[in-house]
Image (spheres, rainbow, N blue to C red):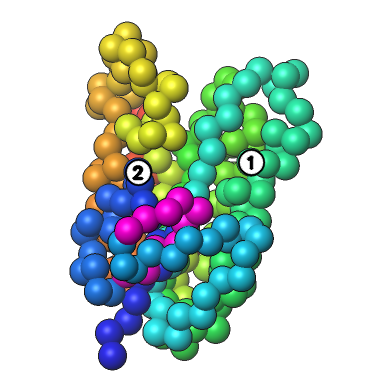
Amino acid sequence: MSHKTLIIGGTKGIGAAILEKLPQEECIIISRNHSDKSNHITCDVLHDDLPDIDDLQGLVYCPGTINLKPFHRLTKEDFIDDYNTNVLGAVRVLQHYYRTLRKNKGSVVLFGTVASQQGMSFHASIAAAKGGLEALGRSLAAEWAPNIRVNIINPSLTDTSLAEGLLNTDQKRENAANRHPLQKIGSPDDIAQAALFCLENNWLTGQTIGVDGGMSTIK
């Protein structure tokens, strides 16, 4: 029996790019969006009952938010919504699938943000949430070793539908690219390659990998 990889949020963006790189018969997708894929389950991971998957070995949690506002305009609800999507959704999924991941020596990949490592204006809410998710991932990597590996990928701005409002003109795209040392915007494929590396490398855990065009470390 082959083991399965579960992609939470696998119908678009980074999740869809990861799905394309894996054998379809070994993947299960969970998202709130409807899909005609036979391996897709429509489910809100914060509120709905999660399906049991006995042969689960890989888990990738892709949901995220981009909520950029000056700090004085952020409401309590903004912080709660970002935290629910990015952290509590992951908590609920990981608690549900912990036993099968442990049984199968599983691998977990979470997605943070470059903004939790490098201070950026207007990112207070999302950086707080993703920074919490990154810390959660390292804590679980320690607690779950040697049975489950947990790693975190911190992307910078990536060309997905979630970032559409930040990239919807040529000038915005040029300005965004120029903020990165590599002078380009990330693609979903760039991030997907890193996710596969984390899933498959059996001597990697507790790591935060910046896939960010060099933004977090060089100028």
The residue shown at (40%, 40%) is 155
Which sits earlier in the primary sequence, circle 1 or circle 2? 2
User: What is the three-letter code of the residue carrying label 1?
Assistant: Asp
Q: Does residue 168 appear in this view?
A: yes
Between 159 and 122, which is closer to the camera in this rendering?
159
Residue 73 location (% of width, % of height)? 72, 19
Between 117 and 36, which is closer to the camera in this rendering?
36
The residue shown at (53%, 61%) is 43
Q: Quadrant of residue 20?
A: bottom left
User: What is the three-letter code of the residue carrying label 2?
Assistant: Gly
Instruction: Tell me the SS state at disc 2.
Output: helix
The residue shown at (58%, 60%) is 45
User: Does 11 sit left or right of 115 as displayed?
Assistant: left
Are there few (<14), some (14-19), or many (20+) residues within 10 Å of tag 2?
Answer: many
User: Does 106 sit left or right of 98 as displayed?
Assistant: left
Q: Quadrant of the C terminus?
A: top left
Q: Which residue is mark 1?
A: 82
In reply to whether residue 35 is colored magenta, the answer given is: yes
| Vertical relation: 51 (above or below) 15 | below
Residue 147 location (% of width, % of height)? 47, 82
Q: Which residue is mark 2?
A: 13
The residue shown at (55%, 51%) is 134
Q: Magenta stretch?
A: 27-36
